[in-house]
């Protein structure tokens, strides 16, 4: 009896994979491999399907369960795969009862299972609450993740994720603080707050607390926590308390990853984003005034429908104007059922070329950042495989394998274009 979990996509999936692993193992399943999928792009879905086929060739006796956002939005596509024994929805995957209830299907797999019998996916839009699952760590990770929010109330025209995650809902502050305290007691030095739309935290809770209030409560009531980090945020939703926390408490790490998506106002409007180019630039300047050493990352889509070369140039320029260091580039991928999929599409070669140019701009920005760090001393959280990260989430190649989860003061002798090299 064994359960393995293969994770695609975001940090929230990483957290949820640990819950899945524990719930599935407790159900005493036969040899099972769970694929916790991502639906953010068509390429992410393709990679999941490819990995499922490869796994089944390598381990023919394993029962394959598919869950995550791609399973929620395209259950039939996975159920039709002969390699798949069960498709579980995003809500069901976290339920111990659901895993126990489907043990019989997995025991009989792959014989005599009709495609419709494989699917256990409910209407995610009917889910109105979320709760943190009290886990004491994440297997294979030196930092811990805590889910504080799930779902999204916004409907960006390119995004399928609300249909995979449902509407926004938050974990009460007391539960979050208790979970962080538990993780610190287990020896974790750094905790990452995760969610689908993190800065919408609290809207459905009594009193509608904001993310900044949650951050301040964690820092106040868990003084033993050494490093608190945020996953991706939407800058237009950042509240005054959050900005004050960045200015006043160094335990909140000086790294923010921003959901920017484009540097052109018309494209932002067609994406149904809620900020303009000037808003993004002003936010980065404001945070830098409060925390001069802050480092920004950002998500940008290349080749959105109707994007002209001039519009794309404004996205290129945004890398410098916002001072982005860690860039995530997404070639536009039409997701069925979204408004952007019905807009006039650009030729694929143009989309790929713009993504290549945007990545090159990001690589140049990262090199400049790495150059500036040579000779500096930073606090590095050691991780697995001789890798670590600074407070600014800059990757570090360690000169020897060090026990994960230690914070070291390291001076950097150079870099390899991607990572700092410890002296």
Image: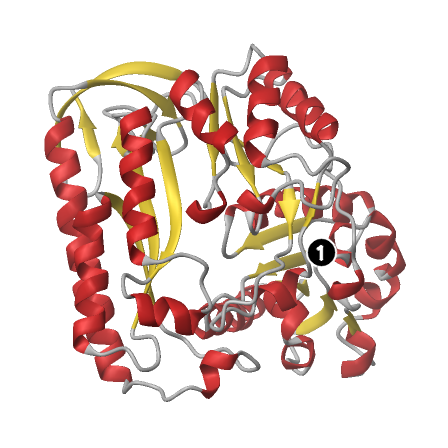
Q: Quadrant of residue 32?
A: bottom right
Identify whether 324 is placed above or below 113.
Answer: above
Q: Quadrant of residue 292?
A: top left
Identify whether 345 is placed above or below 134.
Answer: below
Q: Is residue 417 visible?
A: no
Judge left or right: residue 19 versus residue 405: right
Identify whether 128 is placed above or below 308.
Answer: above
Q: Quadrant of the C terminus?
A: top left
> Where in the figure is residue 310, as x and y percent of width and height?
17, 73
> Where in the figure is residue 321, as x and y percent of width and height?
19, 48
Q: Secondary structure at mark 1?
A: loop
Judge left or right: residue 363 versus residue 8: left
Judge left or right: residue 316 versus residue 125: left
Identified at 35% across, 86% down, the residue is 345
Q: Is residue 146 visible?
A: yes
Name the colouring of the figure. Answer: secondary structure
Identified at 32% across, 71% down, the residue is 266
> Where in the figure is residue 2, as x and y percent of width and height?
70, 48
Residue ID for mark 1: 31
In depth, the one of 49 and 284 nearer the eye is 284
């Amino acid at each position: 009896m064994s359960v393995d979990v293969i994770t695609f996509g975001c940090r929230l999936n990483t957290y949820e994979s640990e819950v899945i692993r524990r719930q599935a193992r407790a159900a005493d399943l036969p040899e099972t491999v769970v694929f916790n999928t991502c639906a953010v792009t068509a390429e992410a879905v393709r990679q999941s399907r490819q990995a499922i086929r490869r796994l089944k060739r390598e381990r023919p006796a394993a029962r394959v369960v598919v869950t995550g956002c791609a399973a929620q939005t395209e259950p039939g596509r996975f159920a039709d795969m002969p390699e798949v024994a069960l498709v579980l929805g995003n809500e069901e995957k976290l339920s111990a009862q659901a895993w126990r209830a489907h043990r019989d299907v997995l025991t009989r797999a792959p014989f005599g299972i009709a495609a419709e019998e494989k699917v256990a996916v409910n209407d995610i839009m009917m889910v109105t609450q979320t709760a943190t699952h009290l886990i004491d760590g994440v297997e294979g990770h030196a930092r811990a993740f805590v889910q504080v929010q799930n779902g999204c109330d916004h409907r960006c025209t390119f995004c399928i994720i609300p249909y995979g995650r449902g509407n926004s809902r938050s974990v009460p502050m007391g539960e979050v603080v208790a979970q962080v305290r538990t993780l610190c007691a287990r020896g974790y030095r750094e905790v990452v707050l995760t969610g689908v739309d993190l800065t919408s935290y609290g809207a459905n809770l009594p009193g509608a607390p904001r993310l900044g209030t949650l951050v301040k409560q964690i820092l106040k009531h868990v003084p033993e926590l050494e490093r608190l980090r945020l996953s991706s945020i939407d800058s237009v939703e950042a509240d005054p308390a959050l900005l004050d926390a960045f200015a006043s408490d160094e335990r909140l790490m000086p790294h923010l990853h921003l959901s920017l998506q484009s540097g052109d106002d018309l494209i932002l409007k067609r994406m149904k984003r809620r900020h303009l180019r000037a808003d993004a630039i002003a936010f980065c300047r404001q945070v830098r005034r409060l925390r001069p050493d802050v480092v920004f990352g950002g998500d940008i889509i290349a080749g959105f429908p109707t994007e002209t070369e001039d519009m794309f140039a404004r996205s290129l320029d945004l890398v410098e104007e916002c001072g982005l260091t860690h860039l995530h580039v997404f070639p536009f991928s039409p997701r069925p059922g979204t408004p952007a999929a019905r807009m006039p599409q650009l030729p694929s070669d143009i989309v790929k070329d713009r993504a290549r140019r945007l990545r090159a701009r990001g690589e140049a920005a990262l090199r400049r950042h790495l150059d500036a760090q040579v000779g500096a001393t930073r606090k590095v959280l050691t991780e697995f495989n001789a890798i670590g990260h600074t407070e600014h989430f800059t990757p570090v190649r360690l000169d020897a394998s060090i026990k994960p989860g230690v914070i070291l003061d390291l001076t950097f002798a150079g870099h390899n274009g991607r990572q700092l090299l410890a002296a």
